[in-house]
Image (tube, helix red, strand yellow):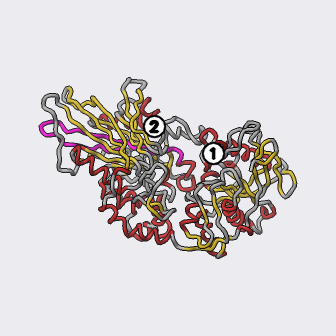
Amino acid sequence: MRPPIGRLIAAGAVVATTLGLTAPAALASSPAAHTVQVTVMASSDIHGNALNWDYYKNAEYDDSAHNDVGLAKISTLVDKVRAERGAGRTLLFDSGDTIQGTPLDYYYAKVEPVTETGQTHPMARAMNAIGYDAVTLGNHEFNYGLPLLATWVKQMKAPVLGANAVSARTGLPAYLPFVIKTMKVPGERPVRVGVLGLTNPGVAIWDKANVEGRLKFLDLVATAKKWVPVIRGLGADVVVVTAHAGDNGMSSYGTDLPVENASAMVAEQVPGIDAVLFGHAHNDVPQRFVTNKRTGAQVLLTEPGKWGQRLSVVDFTLTRQRGRWTVTGKSSATLNANTAAEDPKIVSLMKDQHDTTVGYVNKVIAESRQELSAAESPYKDTAILDYIQKVQTGLVAAAVAGTPDASLPVLSIAAPFSRTAVFPAGPVSVRDMAGLYVYDNTLLGVKMTGAQIKDYLEYSARYFNQLAPGAPADPAALTNAGGIPDYNYDQLSGVSYDIDVARPAGQRITGLSYQGEPVAAGQEFLVAVNNYRQSGGGGFPHIAAAPVVYNAQVEIRQALIDAAAAAGTIDPATFAETNWRLVRDGVPLF
Protein backbone atom coordinates (compact mmCIF):
# COMPACT_ATOMS: atom_id res chain seq x y z
CA MET A 1 0.00 0.00 0.00
CA ARG A 2 1.17 3.57 -0.60
CA PRO A 3 2.14 5.28 2.68
CA PRO A 4 -0.19 8.22 3.36
CA ILE A 5 2.76 10.45 4.29
CA GLY A 6 3.90 10.35 0.68
CA ARG A 7 6.99 12.37 -0.07
CA LEU A 8 7.76 12.99 3.60
CA ILE A 9 9.27 9.53 3.68
CA ALA A 10 12.45 8.76 1.83
CA ALA A 11 14.48 5.61 2.23
CA GLY A 12 15.63 5.61 5.84
CA ALA A 13 14.63 9.19 6.58
CA VAL A 14 11.52 11.01 7.75
CA VAL A 15 10.92 14.75 7.72
CA ALA A 16 8.92 15.83 10.76
CA THR A 17 5.77 17.85 10.29
CA THR A 18 6.01 20.94 12.48
CA LEU A 19 2.64 22.45 13.25
CA GLY A 20 1.86 25.66 15.10
CA LEU A 21 -1.13 26.04 17.37
CA THR A 22 -3.99 28.01 15.92
CA ALA A 23 -5.18 29.18 19.34
CA PRO A 24 -4.52 32.92 19.84
CA ALA A 25 -3.31 32.69 23.43
CA ALA A 26 0.48 32.46 23.75
CA LEU A 27 2.45 30.92 26.59
CA ALA A 28 3.19 33.22 29.45
CA SER A 29 6.65 32.86 30.96
CA SER A 30 8.00 33.79 34.36
CA PRO A 31 10.84 36.32 33.88
CA ALA A 32 12.40 35.57 37.25
CA ALA A 33 12.73 31.84 36.85
CA HIS A 34 12.36 31.69 33.05
CA THR A 35 9.74 28.95 33.43
CA VAL A 36 6.65 28.07 31.40
CA GLN A 37 3.79 25.63 31.89
CA VAL A 38 2.56 23.27 29.20
CA THR A 39 -0.50 21.03 29.53
CA VAL A 40 -1.15 17.89 27.50
CA MET A 41 -4.55 16.19 27.62
CA ALA A 42 -5.31 12.67 26.41
CA SER A 43 -8.30 10.46 25.80
CA SER A 44 -8.13 6.83 24.71
CA ASP A 45 -10.30 3.86 23.81
CA ILE A 46 -13.29 6.00 22.89
CA HIS A 47 -14.70 3.00 20.94
CA GLY A 48 -17.38 4.91 19.08
CA ASN A 49 -18.85 6.65 22.12
CA ALA A 50 -19.71 10.11 20.84
CA LEU A 51 -22.58 10.76 23.24
CA ASN A 52 -23.47 9.59 26.74
CA TRP A 53 -25.76 6.91 25.34
CA ASP A 54 -26.05 3.14 25.65
CA TYR A 55 -27.33 1.85 22.30
CA TYR A 56 -27.84 -1.63 23.73
CA LYS A 57 -30.11 -0.40 26.53
CA ASN A 58 -31.67 2.40 24.49
CA ALA A 59 -31.02 4.80 27.35
CA GLU A 60 -28.50 7.23 28.77
CA TYR A 61 -25.33 5.39 29.74
CA ASP A 62 -24.94 4.39 33.37
CA ASP A 63 -23.05 1.70 35.23
CA SER A 64 -22.66 0.62 38.85
CA ALA A 65 -20.00 3.31 39.42
CA HIS A 66 -22.18 5.93 37.69
CA ASN A 67 -19.63 6.58 34.99
CA ASP A 68 -20.57 8.68 31.98
CA VAL A 69 -19.13 8.21 28.51
CA GLY A 70 -18.61 9.99 25.22
CA LEU A 71 -16.76 12.69 23.35
CA ALA A 72 -19.45 15.26 24.18
CA LYS A 73 -18.42 14.93 27.83
CA ILE A 74 -14.73 14.97 26.92
CA SER A 75 -15.31 18.18 24.95
CA THR A 76 -16.63 19.95 28.05
CA LEU A 77 -13.67 18.79 30.14
CA VAL A 78 -11.24 19.88 27.41
CA ASP A 79 -12.84 23.31 27.19
CA LYS A 80 -12.55 23.69 30.97
CA VAL A 81 -8.84 22.84 30.95
CA ARG A 82 -8.23 25.15 28.00
CA ALA A 83 -9.99 27.97 29.83
CA GLU A 84 -8.02 27.37 33.04
CA ARG A 85 -4.58 26.87 31.49
CA GLY A 86 -4.97 29.05 28.40
CA ALA A 87 -5.84 27.53 25.06
CA GLY A 88 -2.41 28.38 23.64
CA ARG A 89 -0.63 26.32 26.28
CA THR A 90 -2.60 23.08 25.89
CA LEU A 91 -2.55 20.14 23.49
CA LEU A 92 -5.04 17.29 23.06
CA PHE A 93 -4.10 13.76 21.96
CA ASP A 94 -5.80 10.36 21.78
CA SER A 95 -4.21 6.93 22.17
CA GLY A 96 -6.41 4.87 19.88
CA ASP A 97 -9.39 2.53 19.45
CA THR A 98 -11.74 5.14 18.11
CA ILE A 99 -13.75 3.86 15.14
CA GLN A 100 -15.11 0.55 16.49
CA GLY A 101 -17.15 -0.37 19.51
CA THR A 102 -20.72 0.93 19.32
CA PRO A 103 -23.56 0.56 16.81
CA LEU A 104 -22.80 4.15 15.78
CA ASP A 105 -19.41 3.07 14.43
CA TYR A 106 -20.85 -0.12 12.97
CA TYR A 107 -23.63 1.67 11.12
CA TYR A 108 -21.29 4.04 9.31
CA ALA A 109 -18.81 1.26 8.55
CA LYS A 110 -21.22 -1.42 7.35
CA VAL A 111 -24.83 -0.27 6.93
CA GLU A 112 -24.18 3.12 5.33
CA PRO A 113 -20.40 2.98 4.95
CA VAL A 114 -18.75 6.38 4.70
CA THR A 115 -16.46 4.87 2.07
CA GLU A 116 -19.48 4.77 -0.26
CA THR A 117 -21.71 7.63 0.87
CA GLY A 118 -19.05 10.30 1.26
CA GLN A 119 -20.43 11.23 4.69
CA THR A 120 -18.01 12.31 7.38
CA HIS A 121 -17.40 9.52 9.87
CA PRO A 122 -19.08 10.42 13.18
CA MET A 123 -15.83 10.08 15.11
CA ALA A 124 -13.99 12.36 12.67
CA ARG A 125 -16.85 14.84 12.88
CA ALA A 126 -16.74 14.97 16.68
CA MET A 127 -12.96 14.92 17.10
CA ASN A 128 -12.48 17.63 14.50
CA ALA A 129 -14.97 19.84 16.32
CA ILE A 130 -13.22 19.29 19.66
CA GLY A 131 -9.87 20.14 18.10
CA TYR A 132 -7.55 17.19 18.63
CA ASP A 133 -3.88 17.84 17.89
CA ALA A 134 -2.93 14.23 17.09
CA VAL A 135 -4.57 10.81 17.28
CA THR A 136 -2.82 7.44 17.45
CA LEU A 137 -4.05 4.23 15.83
CA GLY A 138 -5.45 1.50 18.06
CA ASN A 139 -5.78 -2.13 17.07
CA HIS A 140 -9.53 -1.76 16.52
CA GLU A 141 -8.93 0.89 13.86
CA PHE A 142 -8.16 -2.02 11.51
CA ASN A 143 -11.36 -4.02 12.20
CA TYR A 144 -13.32 -2.72 9.23
CA GLY A 145 -10.46 -2.94 6.74
CA LEU A 146 -7.86 -0.55 5.37
CA PRO A 147 -10.17 1.36 2.97
CA LEU A 148 -12.43 2.53 5.81
CA LEU A 149 -9.41 3.37 7.93
CA ALA A 150 -7.92 5.39 5.08
CA THR A 151 -11.19 7.31 4.69
CA TRP A 152 -11.27 8.15 8.39
CA VAL A 153 -7.61 9.22 8.37
CA LYS A 154 -8.30 11.50 5.40
CA GLN A 155 -11.33 13.03 7.13
CA MET A 156 -9.44 13.74 10.35
CA LYS A 157 -8.03 17.25 10.68
CA ALA A 158 -5.56 15.97 13.27
CA PRO A 159 -2.63 13.85 12.09
CA VAL A 160 -3.17 10.12 12.70
CA LEU A 161 -0.01 8.45 13.99
CA GLY A 162 1.34 4.90 13.94
CA ALA A 163 5.13 4.73 13.74
CA ASN A 164 5.38 0.96 14.10
CA ALA A 165 2.78 0.15 11.42
CA VAL A 166 4.92 -0.25 8.32
CA SER A 167 4.45 -1.33 4.73
CA ALA A 168 4.99 -5.08 4.37
CA ARG A 169 6.58 -4.40 0.99
CA THR A 170 8.94 -1.51 1.74
CA GLY A 171 9.27 -1.49 5.53
CA LEU A 172 8.55 2.24 5.55
CA PRO A 173 5.97 3.77 7.92
CA ALA A 174 2.47 3.41 6.51
CA TYR A 175 1.21 6.26 8.69
CA LEU A 176 2.76 9.41 10.04
CA PRO A 177 5.20 8.38 12.81
CA PHE A 178 5.22 11.60 14.82
CA VAL A 179 4.39 15.27 14.84
CA ILE A 180 5.95 18.28 16.55
CA LYS A 181 3.69 21.06 17.82
CA THR A 182 5.11 24.55 18.37
CA MET A 183 3.90 26.95 21.06
CA LYS A 184 4.97 30.60 20.97
CA VAL A 185 6.39 32.19 24.12
CA PRO A 186 6.59 36.02 24.16
CA GLY A 187 10.23 37.10 24.31
CA GLU A 188 11.46 33.52 24.53
CA ARG A 189 12.32 30.56 22.35
CA PRO A 190 9.14 28.67 21.34
CA VAL A 191 8.27 25.46 23.17
CA ARG A 192 8.15 22.43 20.92
CA VAL A 193 6.23 19.30 21.94
CA GLY A 194 6.90 16.14 19.98
CA VAL A 195 4.45 13.23 20.04
CA LEU A 196 5.29 9.74 18.79
CA GLY A 197 2.40 7.39 18.05
CA LEU A 198 2.71 3.63 18.59
CA THR A 199 0.00 1.06 17.88
CA ASN A 200 -0.43 -2.55 18.98
CA PRO A 201 1.47 -5.46 17.37
CA GLY A 202 -1.52 -7.73 18.02
CA VAL A 203 -3.20 -6.28 14.93
CA ALA A 204 -1.19 -8.83 12.93
CA ILE A 205 -3.16 -11.58 14.70
CA TRP A 206 -6.50 -9.97 15.46
CA ASP A 207 -7.00 -8.48 11.99
CA LYS A 208 -4.88 -10.86 9.98
CA ALA A 209 -7.40 -10.96 7.14
CA ASN A 210 -7.22 -7.18 6.73
CA VAL A 211 -3.48 -6.58 7.07
CA GLU A 212 -1.60 -9.74 6.08
CA GLY A 213 0.81 -9.03 3.23
CA ARG A 214 0.10 -5.31 3.45
CA LEU A 215 1.21 -4.13 6.89
CA LYS A 216 3.65 -5.27 9.55
CA PHE A 217 3.63 -4.16 13.17
CA LEU A 218 7.01 -3.66 14.78
CA ASP A 219 8.17 -3.78 18.38
CA LEU A 220 7.16 -0.68 20.35
CA VAL A 221 10.47 -0.36 22.20
CA ALA A 222 12.60 -0.73 19.08
CA THR A 223 10.42 1.74 17.19
CA ALA A 224 10.63 4.30 19.99
CA LYS A 225 14.41 3.89 20.11
CA LYS A 226 14.50 4.77 16.41
CA TRP A 227 12.22 7.80 16.46
CA VAL A 228 12.70 9.51 19.83
CA PRO A 229 16.26 10.68 18.94
CA VAL A 230 14.90 11.98 15.63
CA ILE A 231 12.21 13.98 17.43
CA ARG A 232 14.75 15.33 19.92
CA GLY A 233 17.12 16.14 17.07
CA LEU A 234 14.44 18.23 15.40
CA GLY A 235 14.26 20.44 18.47
CA ALA A 236 11.50 18.98 20.63
CA ASP A 237 11.67 20.27 24.19
CA VAL A 238 9.05 17.82 25.42
CA VAL A 239 8.61 14.30 24.05
CA VAL A 240 5.48 12.29 24.76
CA VAL A 241 4.53 8.90 23.41
CA THR A 242 0.92 8.03 22.72
CA ALA A 243 0.85 4.24 22.84
CA HIS A 244 -2.05 1.90 22.28
CA ALA A 245 -0.59 -0.67 24.64
CA GLY A 246 -1.12 -1.44 28.30
CA ASP A 247 1.61 -1.14 30.91
CA ASN A 248 1.98 -4.62 32.42
CA GLY A 249 4.56 -6.00 29.95
CA MET A 250 2.39 -8.99 29.12
CA SER A 251 0.72 -10.31 25.97
CA SER A 252 -2.54 -12.12 25.35
CA TYR A 253 -0.79 -14.05 22.59
CA GLY A 254 2.43 -16.03 22.39
CA THR A 255 5.98 -14.88 21.72
CA ASP A 256 5.77 -14.80 17.92
CA LEU A 257 4.86 -11.10 18.00
CA PRO A 258 6.35 -8.19 19.95
CA VAL A 259 4.98 -7.55 23.45
CA GLU A 260 1.37 -6.38 23.47
CA ASN A 261 1.33 -4.24 26.64
CA ALA A 262 4.71 -2.54 26.35
CA SER A 263 4.06 1.05 27.49
CA ALA A 264 6.07 0.77 30.71
CA MET A 265 8.83 -1.04 28.83
CA VAL A 266 9.06 1.91 26.43
CA ALA A 267 9.38 4.27 29.40
CA GLU A 268 12.03 2.10 31.06
CA GLN A 269 14.17 1.33 28.02
CA VAL A 270 14.03 4.37 25.74
CA PRO A 271 15.87 7.53 26.88
CA GLY A 272 14.46 10.94 26.10
CA ILE A 273 10.76 10.38 26.81
CA ASP A 274 9.01 12.67 29.28
CA ALA A 275 5.62 10.92 29.40
CA VAL A 276 3.72 7.97 27.93
CA LEU A 277 0.00 8.47 27.35
CA PHE A 278 -1.27 4.95 26.95
CA GLY A 279 -4.46 3.03 26.29
CA HIS A 280 -5.69 -0.45 25.33
CA ALA A 281 -6.03 -1.79 28.89
CA HIS A 282 -9.15 0.29 29.71
CA ASN A 283 -7.79 1.21 33.15
CA ASP A 284 -7.96 4.51 35.00
CA VAL A 285 -4.31 5.36 35.77
CA PRO A 286 -4.14 8.96 36.98
CA GLN A 287 -0.37 9.00 37.47
CA ARG A 288 2.43 6.45 37.51
CA PHE A 289 6.17 7.04 37.38
CA VAL A 290 8.65 4.63 35.82
CA THR A 291 12.42 4.99 36.10
CA ASN A 292 14.33 4.90 32.83
CA LYS A 293 17.01 2.24 33.22
CA ARG A 294 19.62 4.13 31.19
CA THR A 295 19.22 7.69 32.44
CA GLY A 296 17.51 7.33 35.81
CA ALA A 297 14.92 9.87 34.67
CA GLN A 298 11.37 9.59 35.93
CA VAL A 299 8.93 8.99 33.08
CA LEU A 300 5.28 9.76 33.74
CA LEU A 301 2.58 7.33 32.57
CA THR A 302 -1.18 7.92 32.55
CA GLU A 303 -4.20 6.14 31.08
CA PRO A 304 -7.70 7.68 30.87
CA GLY A 305 -9.82 4.55 31.20
CA LYS A 306 -12.21 3.80 28.35
CA TRP A 307 -15.11 5.17 26.30
CA GLY A 308 -14.49 8.80 27.31
CA GLN A 309 -15.09 8.09 30.99
CA ARG A 310 -11.85 9.92 31.89
CA LEU A 311 -9.53 12.57 30.47
CA SER A 312 -5.83 12.50 31.37
CA VAL A 313 -4.35 15.92 32.10
CA VAL A 314 -0.55 16.19 32.24
CA ASP A 315 1.11 19.41 33.41
CA PHE A 316 4.76 20.05 32.50
CA THR A 317 6.93 22.77 33.98
CA LEU A 318 9.75 23.84 31.66
CA THR A 319 12.75 25.91 32.71
CA ARG A 320 15.10 27.70 30.33
CA GLN A 321 18.58 26.24 30.74
CA ARG A 322 21.50 27.17 28.47
CA GLY A 323 19.13 28.62 25.91
CA ARG A 324 16.82 25.58 25.82
CA TRP A 325 13.69 24.53 27.58
CA THR A 326 14.09 21.59 29.95
CA VAL A 327 11.29 19.73 31.71
CA THR A 328 11.82 20.34 35.43
CA GLY A 329 8.46 19.18 36.76
CA LYS A 330 5.51 17.05 35.72
CA SER A 331 2.33 15.68 37.21
CA SER A 332 -0.92 14.22 35.96
CA ALA A 333 -4.47 13.41 36.96
CA THR A 334 -7.56 11.97 35.31
CA LEU A 335 -10.80 13.96 35.21
CA ASN A 336 -14.09 12.08 35.52
CA ALA A 337 -16.58 12.67 32.72
CA ASN A 338 -19.48 12.35 35.14
CA THR A 339 -18.52 15.75 36.55
CA ALA A 340 -19.23 17.46 33.21
CA ALA A 341 -22.31 18.17 31.15
CA GLU A 342 -22.35 17.15 27.51
CA ASP A 343 -21.12 19.86 25.19
CA PRO A 344 -24.28 20.99 23.31
CA LYS A 345 -22.13 21.75 20.27
CA ILE A 346 -21.12 18.08 19.98
CA VAL A 347 -24.63 16.84 20.81
CA SER A 348 -26.05 18.96 18.00
CA LEU A 349 -23.32 17.90 15.61
CA MET A 350 -24.00 14.20 16.30
CA LYS A 351 -27.80 14.37 16.28
CA ASP A 352 -28.54 13.14 12.77
CA GLN A 353 -26.08 10.26 12.84
CA HIS A 354 -27.04 9.34 16.40
CA ASP A 355 -30.77 9.36 15.60
CA THR A 356 -30.19 7.26 12.49
CA THR A 357 -28.29 4.70 14.56
CA VAL A 358 -30.97 4.61 17.26
CA GLY A 359 -33.59 3.96 14.60
CA TYR A 360 -31.49 1.14 13.14
CA VAL A 361 -30.81 -0.68 16.41
CA ASN A 362 -34.46 -0.54 17.47
CA LYS A 363 -35.71 -2.19 14.29
CA VAL A 364 -37.63 -5.37 15.18
CA ILE A 365 -36.30 -8.47 13.41
CA ALA A 366 -38.14 -11.37 15.06
CA GLU A 367 -40.35 -12.55 17.92
CA SER A 368 -38.93 -14.65 20.76
CA ARG A 369 -41.19 -17.32 22.20
CA GLN A 370 -39.77 -16.71 25.67
CA GLU A 371 -37.22 -14.53 27.45
CA LEU A 372 -33.67 -15.75 26.97
CA SER A 373 -30.93 -14.34 29.23
CA ALA A 374 -27.15 -14.61 29.17
CA ALA A 375 -26.76 -13.87 32.89
CA GLU A 376 -25.82 -17.47 33.74
CA SER A 377 -23.87 -18.19 30.55
CA PRO A 378 -20.41 -18.16 32.18
CA TYR A 379 -21.26 -21.20 34.32
CA LYS A 380 -24.30 -22.82 32.65
CA ASP A 381 -25.20 -23.94 29.15
CA THR A 382 -27.83 -21.33 28.19
CA ALA A 383 -30.26 -21.23 25.30
CA ILE A 384 -29.22 -17.73 24.21
CA LEU A 385 -25.65 -18.88 23.52
CA ASP A 386 -27.04 -22.01 21.87
CA TYR A 387 -28.68 -19.66 19.39
CA ILE A 388 -25.25 -18.41 18.33
CA GLN A 389 -24.04 -22.01 18.08
CA LYS A 390 -27.01 -23.01 15.94
CA VAL A 391 -26.48 -20.21 13.41
CA GLN A 392 -22.73 -20.78 13.18
CA THR A 393 -23.13 -24.54 12.78
CA GLY A 394 -25.74 -24.08 10.06
CA LEU A 395 -23.56 -21.70 8.04
CA VAL A 396 -20.51 -23.98 8.08
CA ALA A 397 -22.55 -27.13 7.36
CA ALA A 398 -24.22 -25.46 4.38
CA ALA A 399 -20.89 -24.19 3.06
CA VAL A 400 -19.26 -27.64 2.99
CA ALA A 401 -22.28 -29.45 1.53
CA GLY A 402 -21.19 -31.39 -1.54
CA THR A 403 -17.52 -31.33 -0.56
CA PRO A 404 -15.38 -34.19 0.83
CA ASP A 405 -15.79 -32.63 4.29
CA ALA A 406 -19.59 -32.79 4.22
CA SER A 407 -19.66 -36.04 6.18
CA LEU A 408 -17.73 -34.62 9.14
CA PRO A 409 -19.58 -33.55 12.30
CA VAL A 410 -19.84 -29.76 12.67
CA LEU A 411 -19.14 -28.28 16.10
CA SER A 412 -19.32 -24.64 17.11
CA ILE A 413 -17.51 -22.36 19.53
CA ALA A 414 -19.08 -19.40 21.35
CA ALA A 415 -18.21 -17.38 24.45
CA PRO A 416 -20.33 -15.34 26.88
CA PHE A 417 -19.47 -11.86 25.64
CA SER A 418 -22.11 -10.09 27.73
CA ARG A 419 -23.81 -11.25 30.90
CA THR A 420 -26.47 -8.58 30.49
CA ALA A 421 -27.66 -9.75 27.06
CA VAL A 422 -31.37 -10.62 26.88
CA PHE A 423 -33.83 -11.61 24.20
CA PRO A 424 -37.15 -10.41 25.66
CA ALA A 425 -40.25 -12.49 25.26
CA GLY A 426 -41.87 -10.93 22.21
CA PRO A 427 -40.23 -8.49 19.78
CA VAL A 428 -36.45 -8.84 19.38
CA SER A 429 -34.56 -5.93 17.84
CA VAL A 430 -31.20 -5.40 16.19
CA ARG A 431 -30.23 -3.82 19.51
CA ASP A 432 -30.98 -7.05 21.38
CA MET A 433 -28.88 -9.07 18.95
CA ALA A 434 -26.02 -6.58 19.06
CA GLY A 435 -26.13 -6.71 22.83
CA LEU A 436 -25.59 -10.47 22.68
CA TYR A 437 -22.83 -10.41 20.07
CA VAL A 438 -20.91 -7.24 20.83
CA TYR A 439 -17.86 -7.81 18.60
CA ASP A 440 -17.50 -7.38 14.84
CA ASN A 441 -16.19 -10.89 14.25
CA THR A 442 -16.44 -12.97 11.10
CA LEU A 443 -17.02 -16.72 10.87
CA LEU A 444 -14.60 -19.43 9.81
CA GLY A 445 -14.73 -23.21 9.70
CA VAL A 446 -11.62 -25.23 10.60
CA LYS A 447 -10.77 -28.92 10.84
CA MET A 448 -9.65 -30.34 14.19
CA THR A 449 -9.12 -33.76 15.74
CA GLY A 450 -10.67 -35.19 18.88
CA ALA A 451 -7.36 -34.84 20.74
CA GLN A 452 -7.12 -31.20 19.73
CA ILE A 453 -10.70 -30.58 20.82
CA LYS A 454 -9.86 -32.04 24.23
CA ASP A 455 -6.78 -29.80 24.57
CA TYR A 456 -8.83 -26.80 23.50
CA LEU A 457 -11.52 -27.44 26.10
CA GLU A 458 -8.95 -27.99 28.85
CA TYR A 459 -7.40 -24.63 28.02
CA SER A 460 -10.81 -22.96 28.09
CA ALA A 461 -11.66 -24.58 31.45
CA ARG A 462 -8.78 -22.66 33.11
CA TYR A 463 -11.45 -19.97 33.41
CA PHE A 464 -12.79 -21.66 36.56
CA ASN A 465 -11.25 -21.58 40.01
CA GLN A 466 -10.68 -24.97 41.58
CA LEU A 467 -13.52 -25.78 43.97
CA ALA A 468 -12.60 -27.40 47.27
CA PRO A 469 -14.64 -30.29 48.70
CA GLY A 470 -17.66 -28.95 50.55
CA ALA A 471 -17.08 -25.35 49.47
CA PRO A 472 -20.21 -23.53 48.28
CA ALA A 473 -20.64 -23.31 44.51
CA ASP A 474 -20.72 -19.53 44.36
CA PRO A 475 -20.77 -18.42 40.72
CA ALA A 476 -19.15 -15.10 41.60
CA ALA A 477 -16.13 -16.88 43.08
CA LEU A 478 -16.05 -19.68 40.54
CA THR A 479 -15.37 -17.86 37.28
CA ASN A 480 -12.64 -15.58 35.87
CA ALA A 481 -9.73 -17.44 37.48
CA GLY A 482 -6.48 -15.53 37.10
CA GLY A 483 -8.35 -12.59 35.60
CA ILE A 484 -9.44 -14.52 32.48
CA PRO A 485 -12.24 -12.46 30.91
CA ASP A 486 -15.60 -13.95 29.98
CA TYR A 487 -14.84 -13.59 26.27
CA ASN A 488 -11.97 -16.05 26.69
CA TYR A 489 -14.19 -18.79 28.06
CA ASP A 490 -15.17 -20.82 25.00
CA GLN A 491 -18.05 -23.28 25.03
CA LEU A 492 -18.39 -26.01 22.42
CA SER A 493 -21.61 -27.31 20.93
CA GLY A 494 -22.04 -30.56 19.02
CA VAL A 495 -20.21 -32.68 21.59
CA SER A 496 -21.07 -33.43 25.22
CA TYR A 497 -18.67 -32.98 28.13
CA ASP A 498 -18.36 -32.21 31.82
CA ILE A 499 -15.97 -29.73 33.41
CA ASP A 500 -14.89 -31.06 36.82
CA VAL A 501 -13.85 -27.99 38.82
CA ALA A 502 -12.68 -30.15 41.73
CA ARG A 503 -9.73 -31.04 39.53
CA PRO A 504 -6.75 -28.80 38.71
CA ALA A 505 -6.66 -26.88 35.45
CA GLY A 506 -5.60 -29.10 32.58
CA GLN A 507 -7.34 -32.19 33.97
CA ARG A 508 -10.96 -31.09 34.02
CA ILE A 509 -12.69 -32.34 30.86
CA THR A 510 -14.49 -35.63 31.38
CA GLY A 511 -17.01 -37.64 29.40
CA LEU A 512 -16.18 -35.99 26.06
CA SER A 513 -18.49 -37.71 23.59
CA TYR A 514 -20.20 -37.31 20.23
CA GLN A 515 -23.68 -38.78 19.78
CA GLY A 516 -23.23 -40.95 22.84
CA GLU A 517 -19.83 -42.36 21.86
CA PRO A 518 -16.48 -41.27 23.33
CA VAL A 519 -14.57 -38.91 21.08
CA ALA A 520 -11.53 -40.67 19.64
CA ALA A 521 -8.20 -38.85 19.55
CA GLY A 522 -7.95 -39.07 15.77
CA GLN A 523 -11.60 -38.41 15.01
CA GLU A 524 -12.07 -35.39 12.69
CA PHE A 525 -14.49 -32.53 13.20
CA LEU A 526 -15.30 -29.25 11.53
CA VAL A 527 -15.44 -26.38 14.01
CA ALA A 528 -17.21 -23.05 13.48
CA VAL A 529 -15.15 -20.30 15.11
CA ASN A 530 -14.78 -16.53 14.97
CA ASN A 531 -11.84 -14.84 13.28
CA TYR A 532 -10.42 -13.44 16.53
CA ARG A 533 -10.04 -16.88 18.01
CA GLN A 534 -8.92 -18.54 14.76
CA SER A 535 -6.21 -15.90 14.35
CA GLY A 536 -4.75 -16.77 17.74
CA GLY A 537 -6.56 -14.31 20.01
CA GLY A 538 -6.59 -15.68 23.55
CA GLY A 539 -3.77 -18.15 22.86
CA PHE A 540 -6.00 -21.23 22.55
CA PRO A 541 -4.15 -24.34 21.34
CA HIS A 542 -4.34 -25.78 17.80
CA ILE A 543 -6.98 -23.42 16.43
CA ALA A 544 -4.66 -21.00 14.60
CA ALA A 545 -2.86 -23.83 12.80
CA ALA A 546 -5.99 -25.83 11.98
CA PRO A 547 -6.81 -26.20 8.26
CA VAL A 548 -9.44 -23.64 7.19
CA VAL A 549 -12.35 -25.10 5.22
CA TYR A 550 -14.64 -22.06 5.25
CA ASN A 551 -13.96 -18.33 5.32
CA ALA A 552 -16.57 -16.29 3.45
CA GLN A 553 -16.01 -13.20 5.65
CA VAL A 554 -19.58 -13.45 6.97
CA GLU A 555 -20.11 -11.17 9.98
CA ILE A 556 -21.45 -13.28 12.80
CA ARG A 557 -23.68 -10.58 14.27
CA GLN A 558 -25.27 -9.93 10.88
CA ALA A 559 -25.70 -13.68 10.37
CA LEU A 560 -27.60 -13.85 13.68
CA ILE A 561 -29.80 -10.94 12.59
CA ASP A 562 -30.42 -12.46 9.16
CA ALA A 563 -31.31 -15.88 10.59
CA ALA A 564 -33.77 -14.38 13.06
CA ALA A 565 -35.38 -12.21 10.38
CA ALA A 566 -35.69 -15.14 7.98
CA ALA A 567 -37.33 -17.39 10.59
CA GLY A 568 -39.49 -14.66 12.08
CA THR A 569 -39.39 -16.41 15.46
CA ILE A 570 -36.71 -17.39 17.96
CA ASP A 571 -37.89 -20.62 19.55
CA PRO A 572 -35.45 -22.31 21.96
CA ALA A 573 -37.25 -25.60 21.38
CA THR A 574 -35.56 -25.70 17.98
CA PHE A 575 -31.97 -25.13 19.13
CA ALA A 576 -31.47 -25.23 22.91
CA GLU A 577 -29.51 -28.28 24.04
CA THR A 578 -27.64 -28.78 27.30
CA ASN A 579 -24.43 -30.46 26.16
CA TRP A 580 -21.97 -29.30 28.85
CA ARG A 581 -22.12 -28.80 32.60
CA LEU A 582 -19.97 -28.03 35.61
CA VAL A 583 -19.44 -30.88 38.07
CA ARG A 584 -17.51 -31.47 41.28
CA ASP A 585 -16.16 -34.99 41.53
CA GLY A 586 -18.73 -35.97 38.93
CA VAL A 587 -21.72 -34.40 40.71
CA PRO A 588 -23.43 -31.56 38.82
CA LEU A 589 -23.04 -28.16 40.51
CA PHE A 590 -26.20 -26.59 39.12
Nearest to the observer: residue 295 or residue 276: 276
Judge whether residue 329 can be spotted in this image.
Answer: yes
Percent coordinates x, y for residue 56 in the rendering: 51, 62
* Circle nearer the N terminus (2, 1): 2
In the rendered image, which residue does mark 2 sit on? 263
Q: Which residues are magenta?
A: 178-202
Which quadrant would residue 72 be assigned to in this image?
Answer: bottom left
Tell me the crowding category of disc 2: few under 14, some 14 to 19, or many 20 or more residues within 10 angstroms, Cα based.
many
Percent coordinates x, y for residue 384 in the rendering: 66, 62
Q: Are marks 2 and 1 in contact (CB under 8 Å)?
A: no
Question: In the visual, does 403 lie left or right of 225?
Answer: right
Judge whether residue 452 can be spotted in this image.
Answer: no
Assess whether residue 185 is covered by the magenta stretch: yes
Amino acid type for the residue under numbered disc 2:
Ser
**For the residues marked 2 and 1, what is the alpha-carbon distance in whole angstroms?**
32 Å
In the rendered image, which residue does mark 1 sit on? 476
